[in-house]
Amino acid sequence: MDGNNAAAHIAYAFTDVAAIFPITPSSTMAEYVDEWSAQGQKNIFGQTVRVAEMQSEGGAAGAVHGSLQSGALTTTFTASQGLLLMIPNMYKIAGELLPCVFHVSARAVAANSLSIFGDHQDVMATRQTGFALLAESSVQQVMDLSAVAHLAALKGRVPFINFFDGFRTSHEAQKIEVMEYDDLAKLIDQEALNAFRRRALNPDHPVVRGTAQNPDIYFQEREVSNSYYETIPGIVEDYMGEINKLTGRDYHLFNYYGAPDADRIIIAMGSVCDVVEETVDYLNAKGEKVGLLTVHLYRPFSLEHFFRYIPKTVKKIAVLDRTKEPGSIGEPMYLDVKSAFYGKEWQPVIVGGRYGLGSKDVIPSHIVPVFDNLKLPVPKDRFTVSIVDDVTFTSLPAGIDIDTTPAGTTACKFWGLGSDGTVGANKAAVKIIGDHTDMYAQAYFAYDSKKSGGITVSHLRFGKKPIKSSYLINKADFVACHNQSYVNKYDVLAGLKPKGVFLL
């Protein structure tokens, strides 16, 4: 199952109405919901979801707003420019304390050029709207934490953006555990649900909404929502606890991974966290003391929970943002972390870095230099990783090539031509391996923006241990090339391990 499928599975459970409009890479979420609705599949309320495809993302957001006002639990799916078109309605939805979830496969926005690939620029543009922001790092987390977003939104009366990395998580196929609708139904706060239904606009008990307010009252009423946002971290933590009981996993607003006495840590969110975890294991095995703080609930940002999970031995911190805010003195999460430590007796050195814009691949060899940078007496600040910035010289040099995948993992690459069947065959293969063996399986498909006729590279991993490697295969046991002309155009053997197999 891929990330979009996992999000759609959960969204369908909690949804009365889905207002949709397609945009890459979120489109398949809406397609799944539309398909299941047409098949008559029931949600946890025993009803079929009503799906309305609108004329644009702006129309979808307006439909969500209207549907919520009528007492229907409503969901939409979007990304990039589509999410930007929804922002005007998002202010209204949040300001009126209407609980809903926007599932976002986070994607780059068109700036110097258009990109259909993943980063957090779209989500970061919504920080001021009043929506809570919940992030996932893997397909399994999408399955588990999407439920938390729906449950917390309803109980806390605050709308959520539930987001994960476009393509890297939305289109990565992983062997995961699926949440059952019967288990999810037991977690619904029935009192909150009934209260939401009662607040629906109804001609039998009319109310006035959407007023225009003058200076004497607007500011005062704007502050009334503070108490709702103050309760959200506790509500989210409680529901994470419920999911932990069901799954045996360990979710918190912030999850720490690494040495308990670490002196250097990275703070990040999204799929890069799995890459950092692999790197942390590699470095700690060599005697270093490093760690990772994964951010799940980014808004509201809970200082209490933030400081609860950082080892008190930490002296230096690198904050990694997957966005670019030109003209700012730093990227959003970097500034949040700096602000969090303001006035504290504990003052670690904090630097910020940018990575992964437009799905630029980040591998462990890019993360090692981030930790090495923190060793310096004065670490480089406002740096970039995984590129060579020969204009403003912000980039950290790439580290030595390392292999951090679990021992026993088999890595395979398949070079194909768009629409030649290579991707489809590999999807079928990884499904067979995942469903009919005791092995973990991962599949990711790299291709350009062309609908067909472009180059495709399928990346398959399988093994006996969980696979965290959320990056392209750089050391392969098996390489297949399904187009003979590629041999003269591309370095198809790059990264093939000694005694590896090449099939033409």
Image (cartoon, helix red, strand yellow):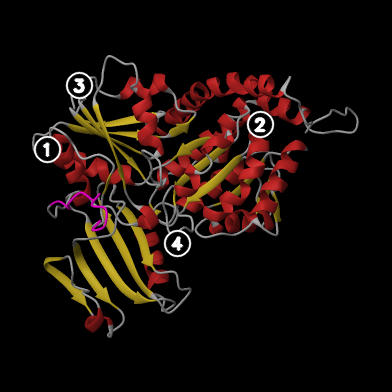
* Quarter residue 330 falls in: top left
Residue matched to label 1: 285
Q: Which callout, 4 or 2, points at the residue further toward the start of the chain? A: 2
Residue matched to label 2: 95
Residue 338 percent coordinates (x, y):
34, 28
Amino acid type at image mark 4: Ser
Residue matched to label 4: 115
Amino acid type at image mark 2: Gly
In the image, the segment drawn in magenta is 389-399
Q: Is residue 398 magenta?
A: yes
Circle 2: element type = helix
Amino acid type at image mark 1: Ala
Task: Please say if the residues under marks 1 and 2 sit with CB atoms less than 8 Å apart.
Answer: no
Count of marks overlaid on the render: 4
Q: Residue at x 51, y 33 (%)?
A: 148
Instruction: Report whether 173 appears left or right of 45.
Output: left
